[in-house]
Image: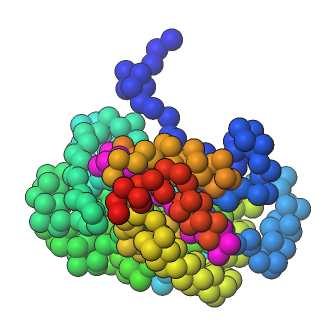
Amino acid sequence: MVERELLRYLEPYDPGIFPAMVTERYGIPESRVANLASNENPYPLPGPILGALRKALEHANRYPDPSYRRGKAAVAAYLGCTEDRVSLGNGASELLATLALVALNPQDRVVIPIPSYSLYLFVAMLRDASLDLVELDPPLFDVDIERLIARAQGAAMVVLGSPNNPTGRALAMSVVKRLLAETEALVVVDEAYAEFSDHSVVGLVPTWPCLVVIRSCSKYFGLAGLRVGYLVGDPALVDRLERVRLPFNVSRIATTALEAVIRKRAWFHATSRRIVAGRERMKTALETRTRCRVVPSDANFLLVKLPDGLSSGSVMEGLLRRGVIVRDVSGMPGLGEGYLRITVGRPAENQRLVRALAHLPETRAASRRAT
């Protein structure tokens, strides 16, 4: 069988542990598992949205509108841009892959600050691009704009998360403006978590043809199970994306959901405020009840540094035995050992996580050593 040499070395994307795995391994019913690993919105969709989805199922035997005009119009109205700047995708992940297909040639240099979402590296590697990874400095992992601009000279693309996954840190608009003004790279800003923060650069898109903003509906809008996202960029770039994307790449159910959540955006705004308030309570509780260090976050999750010498693997195991799932991000590119990423859940789930982490034998022992 003929295969690309790259595929011998490329590891599949690791989605982490899911509740069914905890049930199989430890016998804990899925309904009792607190899943704080995947940065999902923990609150179920409201009734009107579920009603719209049930109605859409009546037409599941028919293809969706291949141009997705209504979905694009809904996004354009939500963001205050024109429809010719919008492309829909089967989640932000597909949009990243399609953008790489359109914008990258083999050996093009792609600059990516790390730690960041591993899929940025994955899609660039599939295009045989040359990765230029810029390490962010702990403890806050903020972007050094001077270093980034220097590395971006002559690059084809710069990919930035804002807020960034797994650090939770958002970019100031001034950082992106300088990057656009002082380099010729295509600047891609992944704003999957932007609506949990007060930072967005989507308003800059009409002024800067080299800026692309990608958003997911999996996080803020709670559609992780339906897979839909959108991209906003220059009309000429969007036209190229529309030419190469797969036909009917977003399902009728997903596009119906997209339109419905935008109509109910006031509900999601209120829900996000509850999540942000829960994030700050969790941060305070972790800092006061454990010896963990917590990175300030603009997203719906926290990056947590365990006490020195403590194994993230052993802590993960202890939490799983108590029916709590978090994400072990130790050792990912740009990140050292001893890091966990914790999604903000409902108040009872957040309290359960803090109690479990505070009472693990490993963390109690680390606290005694620290005192």
The residue lying toward the viewer, choosing from 142 and 217, is 142
- Residue 39 left/right relative to 11: right
The magenta segment: 332-350
Q: Position of residue 281 (x, y in %)?
A: 52, 79
Task: Describe the colour scheme in one phrase.
Answer: rainbow
Q: Which image quadrant: the C terminus?
A: bottom left
Q: Residue at x 39, y 36 (%)?
A: 126
Q: Estimate the x, y position of residue 293 in percent, counting from the top left.
A: 37, 65
131 horizontally vs 18: left or right: left
Q: Quadrant of residue 178?
A: bottom left
Residue farthest to the top?
1
The residue shown at (41%, 83%) is 198
Q: Front-most of 335 and 109?
A: 335
Outermost right residue: 58
How many labels were placed on the picture? Answer: 0
Task: Say whether residue 298 is magenta.
Answer: no
Quadrant in the rendering for residue 234: bottom left
Q: Up-down: is 130 above or below 43?
A: above
Q: Is residue 222 visible?
A: no
173 left or right of 182? Answer: right
Q: Position of residue 101 (x, y in %)?
A: 40, 45
Q: Position of residue 2 (x, y in %)?
A: 46, 14
Q: Quadrant of the rendered structure where residue 124 is?
A: top left
Question: Is residue 50 in view from this perspective?
Answer: yes
Would residue 347 be counted in the magenta stretch? Answer: yes
Choose between 314 and 328: the one closer to the eye: 314
Residue sitting at x 85%, y 61%: 57
Residue in the foreground of this view, choosing between 278 and 260: 278
